[in-house]
Image: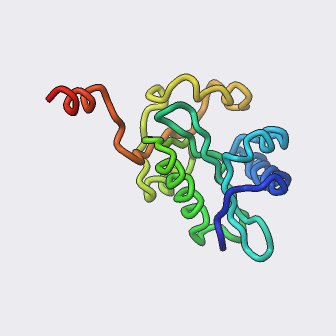
């Protein structure tokens, strides 16, 4: 199995896989057009028989990104593919300087094992709720918000200690 950045020709398979999970209510459905528009956010897992998993890292702001649309084809679940996709997303976040990532999930134990911690949804900026308006569960979302610190965040106090101490 290999993890790579998605290519344009992957969009229909990504769309199919995400929307298979969306039918069960685990993921939000995605239009093919939104996948094409955001193709650079996606990582895919491949085996000889094609695309078997997907996850996206979507930048929200200078210090925050969302990992979303994690899906693995059912014959391949439980084989570490989801973990590898999350690792690819967090490594890219670190490479581009994003200190924290978050997820909205029903798979709390899976993300806890990967170092994510539960937070109150109200702790996340309102900007993240843009897609929620299209969800059938809005405004009564039952997903759990979780975050993971990737790199230390520079705060005013960090700058103060460095420059003025």
Horizontal side, residue 25 vs residue 101: left or right: right
Q: Is residue 139 visible?
A: yes
Which part of the image, by quadrant, shows the N terminus? bottom right
Q: Which picture quadrant has residue 80?
A: bottom right
Could you tell me which residue is drawn at 47 percent across and 55 percent down?
109
Horizontal side, residue 154 vs residue 142: left or right: left
Q: Is residue 71 visible?
A: no
Which part of the image, by quadrant, shows the C terminus? top left
Residue 120 image position (x, y, % from top left)? 44, 32
Up/down of 67 relative to 78, above or below: above
* In the image, farthest residue toward the left: 165
Residue 82 image position (x, y, % from top left)? 59, 61
Residue 26 image position (x, y, % from top left)? 67, 47
Horizontal side, residue 27 vs residue 110: left or right: right
Could you tell me which residue is drawn at 49 percent across and 53 percent down?
111
Up/down of 24 relative to 44, above or below: above
Residue closest to the eye, 48 or 19: 48
Horizontal side, residue 28 vs residue 120: left or right: right
Could you tell me which residue is drawn at 54 percent across and 39 percent down?
65
Residue 143 image position (x, y, % from top left)? 57, 39
Q: Which picture quadrant has residue 137?
A: top right
């Amino acid at each position: 199995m290999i993890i790579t950045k998605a290519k344009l020709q992957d969009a229909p398979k990504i769309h199919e896989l995400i929307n298979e999970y969306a039918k069960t209510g685990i993921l939000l459905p995605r239009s093919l057009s939104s996948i094409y528009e955001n193709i650079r956010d996606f990582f895919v897992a491949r085996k000889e028989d094609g695309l078997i998993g997907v996850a996206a890292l979507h930048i929200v702001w200078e210090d925050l990104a969302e990992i979303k649309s994690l899906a693995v084809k059912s014959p391949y679940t439980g084989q570490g593919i989801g973990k590898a996709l999350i690792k690819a997303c967090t490594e890219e976040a670190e490479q581009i300087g994003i200190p924290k990532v978050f997820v909205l999930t029903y798979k709390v134990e899976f993300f806890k094992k990967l170092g994510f911690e539960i937070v109150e949804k109200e702790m996340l900026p309102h900007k993240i709720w843009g897609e929620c308006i299209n969800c059938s569960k809005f405004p009564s979302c039952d997903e759990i918000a979780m975050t993971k610190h990737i790199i230390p965040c520079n705060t005013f106090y960090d700058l103060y200690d460095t420059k003025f101490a």
